């Protein structure tokens, strides 16, 4: 089972509404919960959800989207605690028409040091995560020329047990 749904409805927090949260939560978080309920008694080889780094780093104007992805992260943890298959991948932005392909989104991500992932690299990372039986992984491409204070802030927020940077990607 692979759940890849997602909808964005960006707005500053003061402009968010219950309806905007529903719009974003329904396909991603509620959809994953529905699939979880429908498959709990099935012998699945895998249960993969496509999450986002927005649930880890936050993202301006995406409180609803970050919430939906954080709910996915929690679902993965819950399924694994129940002995059920679950893998969540918190992807950074994708290149070539991903959800963060607008000019404004690319500028915002660039300021955070995030570089869009080529789809082939993202899919190769997903294959590696699944093959290793990892429960939750973050797949990003980062611009190391971003000021160190930005990366130091992220390092304080997250402990990393494994970090691999493929050459040429």
Image (cartoon, rainbow, N blue to C red):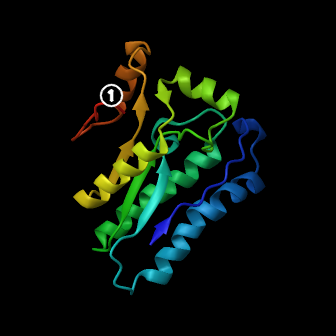
Which residue lies at the image location 35% right of the left edge and 48% below the top edge? 125
The image position of residue 141, as x and y in percent, is 41, 32
Q: Place residue 149 in its image quadrant.
A: top left
Q: 70 or 101, which lies in front? A: 101
The image position of residue 40, as x and y in percent, is 41, 81
Which residue lies at the image location 51% right of the left edge and 24% below the top edge? 112
Would you place residue 64 above or below residue 11 in this image? below
The image position of residue 104, as x and y in percent, is 69, 27
Residue bearing the label numbered 1: 155
Q: Is residue 2 left or right of residue 68?
A: left
Which residue lies at the image location 51% right of the left edge and 75% below the top edge? 35
Count of all numbered marks drawn on residues in the image:
1
Q: Residue furthest bottom?
A: 41
State which quarter of the image contains the C terminus.
top left
The image position of residue 129, as x and y in percent, is 30, 54
Binning the other alpha carbons within 10 Å of mark 1 as few (below 14), some (14 to 19) or many (20 upward) gives few
Would you place residue 54 above or below residue 36 in this image? above
Q: 77 or 132, which lies in front? A: 132
Q: Is residue 13 left or right of residue 42?
A: right
State which quarter of the image contains the N terminus.
bottom left
Label 1 residue SS: helix
């Amino acid at each position: 089972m692979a759940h890849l749904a997602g909808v964005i409805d960006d707005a500053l927090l003061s402009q968010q509404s219950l309806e905007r949260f529903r719009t974003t939560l329904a396909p991603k978080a509620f959809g994953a919960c529905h699939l979880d309920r429908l498959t709990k008694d099935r012998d699945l080889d895998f249960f993969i959800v496509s999450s986002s780094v927005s649930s880890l780093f936050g993202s301006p104007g995406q409180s609803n989207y970050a919430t939906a992805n954080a709910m996915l992260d929690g679902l993965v943890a819950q399924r694994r605690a129940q002995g059920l298959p679950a893998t969540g991948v918190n992807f950074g932005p994708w290149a070539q028409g991903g959800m963060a392909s607008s000019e404004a989104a690319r500028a915002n991500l660039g300021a955070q040091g995030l570089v869009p992932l080529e789809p082939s690299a993202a899919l190769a990372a997903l294959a590696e995560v699944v093959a290793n039986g990892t429960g939750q992984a973050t797949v990003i491409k980062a611009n190391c020329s971003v000021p160190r204070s930005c990366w130091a802030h992220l390092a304080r927020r997250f402990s990393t047990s494994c970090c691999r940077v493929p050459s040429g990607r």
